Amino acid sequence: MAKLADVLSAIDALGFDPGRSKVVATRLRDAGVIPAGGPAQSPNLNDTDALRLILAIAVTSKIRLADHDHDVYAGLVPFGMSSTRIRHILFRERLSTQSSC
């Protein structure tokens, strides 16, 4: 887990505008996509939260749509498959790998 400020510093090193990144993070936090901190306490982000933030910063063309854009990209699945079908395929592959060992 990392503090939001540390994650934003790391994202800045990727070449994104720091001010814009902070505003996108606020939008995502307000929408409940990434955790909110407590009173006078910065939120802790796990790896998934950090990736959500990077994704939103990278794909959002208009800051006011950051939470919406995140939801759209998060809903994408390869080849139009449902997440249930993907889990089934991965589970089946894992079983075949284990049985061949």
Image (cartoon, rainbow, N blue to C red):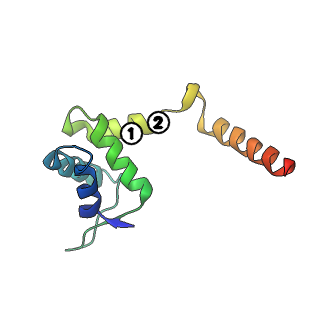
Does 58 sit above or below residue 27? above
Q: Amino acid at mark 1?
A: Asp
In the image, farthest residue toward the bottom: 40
Q: On the image, which quarter does residue 96 sit in?
A: top right
Measured Cα–Cα span from mark 2 to mark 1: 6 Å
**For the N terminus, which image quadrant?**
bottom left
Task: Using a 10 Å C-alpha cutoff, classify the residue at mark 2 as few (fewer than 14 neighbours), some (14 to 19) or many (20 or more).
Answer: few
* Residue at the spot 23% in from the left edge and 57% down from the top edge: 9
Name the residue carrying label 1. Answer: 71
Q: Position of residue 63 (x, y in %)?
A: 20, 39
Does 68 sit above or below residue 42? above
Q: Amino acid at mark 2?
A: Gly
**Residue nearest the viewer, comparing 74 with 31:** 74
* Residue at the spot 41% in from the left edge and 61% down from the top edge: 46
Does 75 sit above or below residue 101? above
- Classify mark 1: helix, strand or loop: helix
* Residue at the spot 38% in from the left edge and 48% down from the top edge: 52
* Residue at the spot 47% in from the left edge and 36% down from the top edge: 75
Q: Position of residue 6 (x, y in %)?
A: 27, 63
Q: Position of residue 50 (x, y in %)?
A: 36, 54
Task: Using a 10 Å C-alpha cutoff, classify the residue at mark 1 as few (fewer than 14 neighbours), some (14 to 19) or many (20 or more).
Answer: some
Q: Are marks 2 and 1 in contact (CB under 8 Å)?
A: yes
Q: Which mark is residue 75?
A: 2
- Classify mark 2: helix, strand or loop: loop
